[in-house]
Amino acid sequence: MTTTIVILAAGKGTRMRSAIPKIMHKISDRPLLEHVYDMSKQLPNSQIKIIYGHGAELVREGLKHLDADWIEQKQQLGTGHAVQQITGHIEDSNKVLILYGDVPLLKLDTVNTLLDHAGEYSLGLLTVNLSEPRGYGRIVRDSSGNVLKIVEEKDATQGEKLIKEVNTGIMAVKGDQLKTWLGQLNNNNAQGEYYLTDIIEMAVRDNIKIITHQPHNEDEVMGVNNRMQLSHLERVFQQEQAAYLMEQGVTLRDPARFDLRGSIEQLGQDIEIDVNVILEGQNKIGHNVIIGANTRIKNSSIGDNVEILDNCVIENAIIGPGSRIGPFARLRPETVLANDVHIGNFVEIKKSDVAEKSKINHLSYIGDTTVGSNVNIGAGTITCNYDGVNKHRTVIEDGAFIGSDTQLVAPVTVGKNATIGAGSTITKNTPENQLTLSRNKQVSISGWQRPVKNDCKDAAAKLMSGTITKDK
Ligand code: UD1
Ligand code: CA
C-alpha cells in the first residue's frame, strides 16, 4: 500500500520574530522541514506532499532540492483547510500520514506504528501526556477510555482543560475516509478555523476506532514556536548524535559540549574528542584520532593516528596518517597533507600539498605551494603568493630547509636539499644542495651613543647657556 505523506508547513511562526519562515530555521545546519522530509524519505512506497504558504518564495528556493510535490495554501485558514488543499491528490486506497514541518525530531518507528494503526476500521493518532498541556488540543475519552474527540484549548470547557493527554497533530488515516471527512469540516469554532482535529469526532461517528500511540518522549513531538524551543531541540538532537557516536566507540570528553552538524562518513576506532568540538558537513575520521578542545572541522578527511591539538580550524582539507596539527592552526580549503606532517601553532595553510614528514611548526603562511618531503620550514616563513592581481605558486622540493623569517616571493622554486638562510627574501629559484641567503651585511658602529629624550636635551642646553642654574 502506498502512503501519502502530507507535511503541513504553511504557518507563519510569529513567535520566532524572524524574517525567515519558521520551517527554514535550522537544527544542526538543516532547515526544520528538511528533518521531517529526511525521516519521511525513509518510508517505502510513499509520496511526499508539502503544504507551504508563508514565505513561499524563500521556502521553495531554499528547499528546491527536495523530491516532493509542493502545494501552496494561499491563506492559512487552519490545519483542516491545509489538508483540504490536496484532496484532489489523495488516492482512496492510500494511507495518509499527516506531519508538521516544524516538528523535527519525530522518529521513524513511531510513524511506522501509527501507520500500522490506520486502516479500514481504525485511525492512528499520536498523543502525548504533558504536565503542562496549555495551548494544545485535548484528547477527550469516554469512561471506558475510548477516544471521543479532540477539543482545542480555546473551545474547551474548564473540565476539558484539566486533561493532560494532548494531540500532537500527527495522525494516519485511510485516504477515502479522510476525503469524506475533509468535505464535512466547518469553521464554527472559537478561532473561526477549519480544524483537522474535527475529523476525530467524525471518525467515531462513522464507527472508525481511534487507536492512539505515544512517542518515546515529549521532545520527539515537540514543535518549534520560538527560539527557546529551537535551541532546546538543537541540544536534544546533538545529544542523540553524541549518544550514537559513543555507542560506535567514540570517546566524547563531554557529550553536552559537542556538535555534529552534518555526517561522519567514515568513523575509525578509538577516536577521542575533547570539549567544544564542532564537526560540520561531511567528514571522515580514521582510527586513533585525537581532536583537541575548541576545534572546528568541516568537510575534511583525517587519517589514522592523527592528533589535532586545541583551537584549530580545518576546512576542506585532507590530513594524512600520523600527522600532528596545532594548537592554533588553520588549514584552509585544498590543503593536502601526506603522512607524518607537523603543522604547528599560528600556521595557516591554503591550497597547498605537503609531502610526508615535512614540518611547518611556527607562525607561517603557506599558500598555493607544493612542499616536498622532509622539508623543514622555519618560524615566520611566508609564501608571497599574491602580487595584488594574480596568485602564483611556490615549489619547495624534498629535503629543503627554510630558515626562519623567510619570504618566498612566488613564482619561485626552492631546489632539493637547498638551505635558505634566515631572514631572506627569495625572489629567484634557488639551486639544489646550496645555501642561498639574501641579507644585508651585519655592521657594528663603535663609539655610537644612544639618543636621549628631547626634554633632557633642552634642559642640558639651557644649563650650558646659563638660562637656568643647577640646584645646590
Ligand atoms: C494544532 C492542533 C492541536 C495540537 C497542536 C499540536 C488543530 C486545529 N489543532 O494546534 O490540536 O495540539 O497542533 O502542536 O489542528 N498549518 C498550515 N496551515 C494552516 C494552519 C497550520 O500549514 O492554515 C501548519 C503550521 O505551519 C504547523 C501546523 O500546521 O506546522 C500546526 O499549526 P499550528 O497553528 O501550530 O497548530 P495549532 O492550531 O496550534
Ligand atoms: Ca503549534
Image: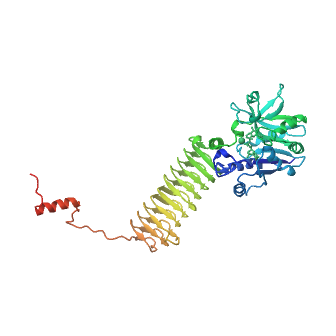
Horizontal arrangement in the rendering, residue 317 relative to residue 421 (left or right): right
Which of 414/189 is in front?
189
Which of 357/184 is in front?
184
Which of 465/217 is in front?
465
Q: Which residue ends up furthest to the bottom in the rendered image?
A: 428
Which of 315/337 is in front?
315
Is residue 285 visible in the rendered structure shown here? no
Horizontal arrangement in the rendering, residue 464 relative to residue 21 (left or right): left
Horizontal arrangement in the rendering, residue 237 relative to residue 321 (left or right): right
Is residue 443 visible in the rendered structure shown here? yes
Q: Which residue ends up furthest to the top in the rendered image?
A: 143
**Vertically, is 190 above or below 356?**
above
Q: How many marks?
A: 0
The image position of residue 142, as x and y in percent, is: 83, 27
Horizontal arrangement in the rendering, residue 1 relative to residue 461 (left or right): right
The image position of residue 31, as x and y in percent, is: 68, 50
Which quadrant would residue 257 be assigned to in this image?
Answer: top right
- Please tell me which residue is depicted at 50% across the width and 56% down the height of the picture: 342
The image position of residue 120, as x and y in percent, is: 90, 40
How is the model colour-coded?
A: rainbow
Tell me which image quadrant ligand 1 sits in.
top right
- Please tell me which residue is depicted at 33% across the width and 71% down the height of the picture: 440
The image position of residue 291, as x and y in percent, is: 55, 48
Which quadrant would residue 431 be assigned to in this image?
Answer: bottom left
Q: Which residue ends up furthest to the left in the rendered image?
A: 472
